[in-house]
Amino acid sequence: MAHEVDETTLPVAAQTSRSAVDRMRAHRERRRLGLRCLTVQLRDTEIDVLISKGLLMPEARNDTRAIIQAVHHHFDKTLASTP
């Protein structure tokens, strides 16, 4: 049985050493789930806002995974569909 891999929890070196086949498989799985993988640049002031809103701990301001989680939480709170 194949194991699913959460790319956000892999070290950068592990992500970059994946084969083209693995990257394509991950791309197709994301697309099937309605997800897109994008690179987004954040300003320091935007990270400050994540901290001020309580979405990111101040000591995690340079932690990429923590910032990604904070942005996802912000999206969940602000972009959630309402019936």
Image (cartoon, rainbow, N blue to C red):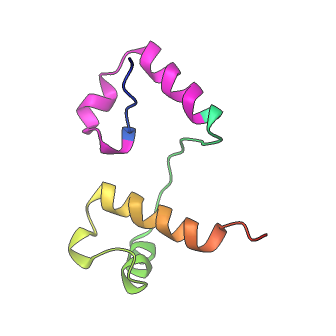
Q: Is residue 28 magenta?
A: yes
Q: Quadrant of the N terminus?
A: top left
Circle count? 0
- Residue 48: x and y in percent read 38, 79
Residue appearing at x 38%, y 38% in the figure: 7
Residue farthest toward the left in the current orientation of the protein: 59
Nearer-the-camera pick, 1 or 28: 1
- Residue 36: x and y in percent read 59, 42
The magenta segment: 8-30
Nearer-the-camera pick, 13 or 26: 26
Q: Quadrant of the C terminus?
A: bottom right
Task: Tell me if 27 is positioned left or right of 21 in this view.
Answer: right
Residue appearing at x 56%, y 66% in the figure: 76
- Residue 39: x and y in percent read 50, 47
Residue farthest toward the right in the current orientation of the protein: 83
Q: State the image quarter where residue 17 is shown.
A: top left
Q: Is residue 71 above or below residue 20?
A: below
Residue appearing at x 39%, y 73% in the figure: 47
Q: State the image quarter where residue 80 is shown.
A: bottom right
Residue appearing at x 26%, y 60% in the figure: 63
Task: Tell me if 57 is positioned left or right of 3 in this view.
Answer: left
Q: Main secondary structure of the magenta part?
A: helix
Q: Is residue 74 magenta?
A: no
Q: Is residue 10 above or below residue 71?
A: above
Q: Is residue 12 above or below residue 71?
A: above
Residue farthest toward the front in the current orientation of the protein: 1
Q: Is residue 66 above or below residue 26?
A: below
